[in-house]
Image (spheres, grey):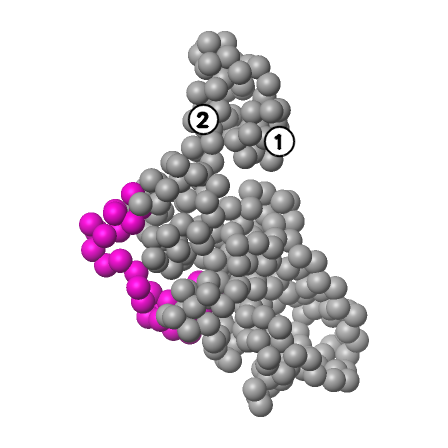
Amino acid sequence: MLSVRSLLSGDGVEIADVLCTHARGKARESERVATHAVVFVRRGCFVRSADGAEAVLDPTLAYCMNPEQEQRYDHPHDGGDACTSLALDAGLLASLWGGDPQLPSVPLPVAPELDLEHRLLLSAARARVDRHALLERAIALTAGALESVDAARVASGRPTSARARHALADGARELLASASERSLPELAQTLAVSPHHLSRVFREVTGHTISRHRMRLRARSALERIAGGEPNLSGLAAELGFADQSHLCRVLGNETGMTPTSLRAMLA
């Protein structure tokens, strides 16, 4: 009756596609929650009972789960439902939520633009795009949902001065220049800031995301090697962290508007 497909797992975040085919009626028993998670409803309607309260949930709402919480799902209609679960480890969640990983018990309103971002994230995760980009988007989506109930709490710890924001972005660029595979949570931990704040500030200062900056660094490294006569694009792609040779070619095309063959002819 319940199918859970993990689409991304690592660096303290798991994205899962959850499908339920439960028929109309009440659940036979409660279940115990194992992790912190924010769950977006994509389709259907159901009633969740937790912490002594009931909540009717549909695609205009998200809800939160906390470890050891007892919950039950009842279904007023046939047809089942579909959700997207974003599970975060306690440390990462605490950095997003003012130092405390305990998530709110009330449903979270999902504005149209947030719902679209949720569905775009799911589509990208199903397509297995760059994991760093998925991670950054998942953290931003989680923060966006939590902002709907307490924006000040999510904003706590954000650098307030322009100088501090530029210093934070410069710190991230410096770390990525030495090791571009550092994940967003790793960068944030080193720089002693929330991953959400780091991601948002970096984009504000540079005009692009951390995952895009990371990809541009890879592209520059590829161009340097191609200019030096590197003949093995497949090996180069694997060495620099691209998914495969096609991924390398797509990124170089997006960055330069040219194919590797044309670039080699011009740069060699």
Decide: is 49 above or below 198: below
| Secondary structure found at label 1 | loop
Q: Position of residue 165 (x, y in %)?
A: 26, 51
Circle nearer the N terminus (1, 2): 2
Q: Is residue 261 above or below residue 86?
A: above
Q: Is 9 on the left-hand or right-hand side of 197?
A: right
Q: Is residue 121 above or below residue 233?
A: below
Task: Please name whichever residue, 244 or 205, is drawn nearer the observer in this view of the structure.
Answer: 244
The three-letter amino acid code for the residue at tag 2 is: Ser
- Residue 264 visible, this angle: no
Please name the amino acid that badge 1 sits on: Asp
At a point 59% along the width and 47% down the height, the residue shown is 124
Residue where numbered disc 1 is placed: 244
Looking at the rendered structure, the secondary structure element under dot 2 is: helix
Which segment is the magenta one?
143-170
Asked whether residue 268 is in view, the answer is yes
Would you name the residue on which mark 2 appears? Answer: 221
Q: Sort mark 1 into few (<14), some (14-19) or many (20+) by Cα contacts within 10 Å.
A: some
Q: Is residue 224 above or below residue 12?
A: above
Q: Assess disc 2: are there few (<14), some (14-19) or many (≥20) residues with their C-alpha within 10 Å of its C-alpha.
A: some
Q: Are marks 1 and 2 in contact (CB under 8 Å)?
A: no
Residue at 47%, 31% (x, y): give it. 218
Residue 76 position, x and y percent, is 71, 80
